[in-house]
Image (tube, helix red, strand yellow):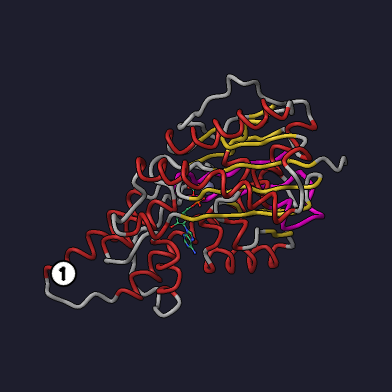
């Protein structure tokens, strides 16, 4: 493994982040400037505001990442940047900054898929982790099971047909009057409640790895509306606990079915929803029961951050997959079957 210095840049949604990595796994800095307080009063991310905030933040965040890493811009040997999926205007800020830096420094540019970045966050949290393993990716925009066969070989087992898990958390929280982002709020509330309300499980069909959260989401919303119409006080903690249990049930069942089918001995968790304490606890317990190794990123590395982008970029570049200066933002980029 080389000791190359990689600058990572992330601006796909509401976090502006820059990081410096030495080699593939040593974080020298990982600066994250979140816009959550700015978007909270609107109940969700406002794309135009996000882009503008990224423009204001990007250079100070990069400067701070270099300062904390105690390196100079001229020491950077490659620049990795998220080019999708995400908000187009937000992505363009990071992509433009990365292109300008790579061009002016005369170093390689590496366009990174944000979802692959989330998976690679596990290499930073768990230095001994090596492919192959099964990855459960649960973020605000995606829910998927990916068989990671090698650093460049991903097989998509299945993904959501409709809403992502994080999206369902956010929408339900909004209806319950909780501030954005809803996931962490529901997580905290669930700890105070009992999962004693029966919501339909989110697509428990066996033999496929697709998810569907829209039915569950509607059931919870209908329940909330009917309780309100009956003039009853909402049992918010029990609703949160019951909803979260339904989500965790289906994610756990499908993840271990996939582990078994692919014959893997390791499961990793990735994406913003990986920070959910109920999900982490259940996967950990189930993995221990089955004798499967389980890894998940630290809270900081679960959220959108540039260290995971630099890590993914490092391994891509080692395999010779860099980008040219025509790199563009691809808002709808998915988790593809990859044989880079
Ligand atoms: O990965 P991420 O930061 O953004 C995307 O790439 O989409 O994920 C953000 C999502 C949000 O929907 C947020 O509510 C959810 O992750 N989230 C959580 C928790 N922390 C963040 N969901 C459930 N429990 C949490 N503790
Ligand atoms: Zn993300």
Image quadrant for the C terminus?
top right
Q: Residue at x 71, y 33 (%)?
A: 153
What residue is disc 1 on? 228
* Residue 167 location (% of width, % of height): 39, 51
Q: In this rendering, is residue 179 above or below 52?
A: below
Q: Is mark 1 within 8 Å of ligand 1?
A: no
Residue 148 in which image quadrant: top right
Q: Is residue 235 magenta?
A: no
Q: Which segment did they paint magenta?
A: 122-149
Tell me: 155 left or right of 88: right
Of residues 244 and 323, the one nearer the viewer is: 323
Q: Residue 75: horizontal and vertical position, in percent?
A: 79, 40
Residue 103: image x %, image y %?
67, 25
Q: Foreground residue, 194 or 5?
A: 5
Residue 254 makes an appearance in the image: no
Q: Quadrant of the N terminus?
A: top right
**Residue at image location 26% in from the left, 61% down from the top:** 175
Residue at position x 72%, y 30% from top? 105
Q: Residues within 10 Å of mark 1 (few under 14, many from 20)?
A: few
Kindly state the secondary structure of the residue where label 1 is placed: helix
Q: Residue at x 75, y 44 (%)?
A: 72
Is the residue 14 above or below the residue 225 in the image?
above
Q: Is residue 28 above or below residue 323?
A: below
Residue closest to the eye, 103 or 23:
103
From the viewer's perspective, is 110 left or right of 42? right
Q: Is residue 145 magenta?
A: yes
Q: In the visual, does 91 lie left or right of 26?
A: left
Count every numbered label the image shows and give the total: 1
Q: Can residue 190 be seen in this snapshot?
A: yes
At which x and y percent is residue 335? 56, 35
């Amino acid at each position: 493994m080389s000791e190359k210095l990689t600058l990572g840049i992330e601006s796909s949604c509401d976090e502006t982040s820059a990081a410096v990595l030495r080699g593939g796994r040593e974080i020298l800095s990982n600066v994250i400037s979140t816009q959550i307080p700015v978007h909270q009063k609107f109940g969700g991310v406002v794309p135009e505001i996000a882009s503008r905030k990224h423009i204001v933040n990007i250079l100070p965040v990069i400067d701070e990442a270099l300062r904390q890493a105690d390196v100079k811009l001229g020491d950077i040997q490659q620049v990795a940047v998220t080019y999708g999926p995400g908000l187009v205007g937000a992505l363009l800020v990071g992509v433009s900054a990365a292109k300008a830096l790579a061009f002016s420094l005369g170093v390689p540019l590496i366009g990174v898929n944000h979802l692959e970045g989330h998976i690679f966050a596990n290499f930073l949290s768990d230095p001994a982790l090596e492919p192959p393993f099964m990855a459960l990716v649960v973020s605000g925009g995606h829910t998927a099971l990916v068989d990671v066969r090698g650093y460049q070989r991903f097989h998509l087992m299945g993904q959501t047909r409709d809403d992502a898990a994080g999206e369902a958390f956010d929408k339900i929280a909004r209806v319950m009057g909780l501030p954005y982002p809803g996931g962490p709020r529901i997580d905290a509330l669930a700890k105070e409640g009992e999962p004693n309300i029966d919501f339909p499980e989110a697509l428990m069909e066996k033999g496929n790895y697709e998810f569907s959260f829209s039915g569950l989401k509607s059931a919870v919303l209908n329940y909330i509306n009917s309780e309100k119409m009956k003039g009853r006080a909402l049992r918010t903690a029990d609703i949160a606990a019951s909803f979260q249990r339904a989500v965790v049930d289906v994610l756990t069942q499908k993840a271990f079915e996939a582990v078994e089918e692919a014959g893997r001995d390791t499961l990793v968790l990735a994406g913003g929803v990986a920070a959910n304490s109920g999900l982490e606890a259940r996967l950990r317990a189930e993995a221990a029961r089955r004798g499967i190794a389980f890894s998940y990123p630290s809270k900081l590395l679960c959220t959108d951050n540039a260290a995971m982008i630099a890590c993914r970029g490092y391994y891509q570049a080692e395999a010779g997959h860099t980008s040219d200066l025509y790199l563009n933002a691809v808002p709808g980029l998915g988790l593809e079957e990859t044989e880079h």
